[in-house]
Structures are given as structure tokens and as C-alpha cells.
Amino acid sequence: MSEPPALGRDDVAHVAGLARLSLSEEELDTFTGQLARVIDHARDVSSLDVHDVPPTAHPLPVRNVLRTDDPCPGLDRGEVLAAAPDVEDNRFKVPRIVGEAP
């Protein structure tokens, strides 16, 4: 397999333009080196033989530490609304959001 071309400043400038980022000359130099290292690392990882490695979501065994989800009765609507600072039409009344039509 042939080696892909090296990442250059023009490539980083092009990607920055696509992302609508304005980069200084110094930033272009910095990001060119950083992005090249990231791509090299991704190339190293993709070259690993992981054929016998099962897919995993976490490197360590994890168990759920939450309680079981047992159904229980909900709160009484009237009791909850009685404790609310402001109620309108049997619902919580909250301040209108700025810019929203009345």
C-alpha cells in the first residue's frame, strides 16, 4: 500500500476555509504540525490488527450501580400546583421568553 501524501499548509488553509476559520500564518504553522500528528496517529491505529478483538464500549467491566426502576404513583397535580409561585389554567405560569409573540 502506498503512503498517502503528507499534509501541507495549503491543506490546512483549505480545511480552515471550509470551516470558515480565519487563521494567522503562525496558527497555520502550528495547526499543520498538530493535524499531521493526529493523522499519523490515526494511520498507526488503523494499521493495527484487531481482527480477534471484540467490540467494546468501555475498556473495563462496568455494571449499573443505579437502583431498579420500580413504577410508583406520580405527584398529585393539585398539590404540586398549590405549591407553585404562579398558576394559570391549571398549569405553571412562567415569565414569557424575550422575543416570543404574546
Image: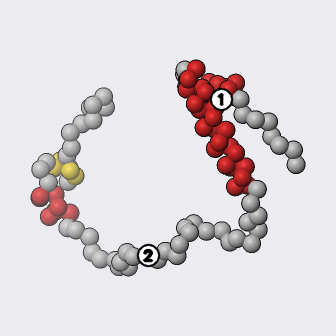
**Residue found 49% across the figure and 74% down from its top:** 62
Can you give x and y, in whole percent of width and height, for residue 61 in the image? 52, 76
Mark identifier at residue 83: none
**Amino acid under disc 1:** Val
Locate residue 78: give its quadrant: bottom left
Asked whether residue 47 is in view, the answer is yes
Which residue carries the number 2 mark? 64
The residue carrying pointer 2 sits among few (fewer than 14), some (14 to 19) or many (20 or more) residues within 10 Å by Cα, namely: few
**Residue found 66% across the figure and 68% down from its top:** 55
**Residue found 80% across the figure and 40% down from its top:** 4
Can you give x and y, in whole percent of width and height, for residue 26 in the image? 56, 23
Whether tag 1 and tag 2 are in contact, CB under 8 A, the answer is no
The residue carrying pointer 1 sits among few (fewer than 14), some (14 to 19) or many (20 or more) residues within 10 Å by Cα, namely: many
Mark 1 vs mark 2, foreground winner is 1
Locate residue 28: give its quadrant: top right
Asked whether residue 18 is in view, the answer is no
75 and 59: which is toward the camera: 59
28 and 19: which is toward the camera: 28
Q: Does 5 sit left or right of 55 as displayed?
A: right
Q: In what element is the residue under mark 2?
A: loop
Q: Does 72 sit left or right of 79 as displayed?
A: right
Which residue carries the number 1 mark? 12
Quadrant in which the C terminus appears: top left
Can you give x and y, in whole percent of width and height, for residue 50 in the image? 73, 66
**Amino acid under disc 2:** Asn
4 and 55: which is toward the camera: 4
Q: In what element is the residue under mark 1?
A: helix
Can you give x and y, in whole percent of width and height, for residue 48 in the image? 74, 60
Structural distance between the alpha carbons of marks 1 and 2: 43 Å
Q: Is residue 22 above or below residue 36?
A: above
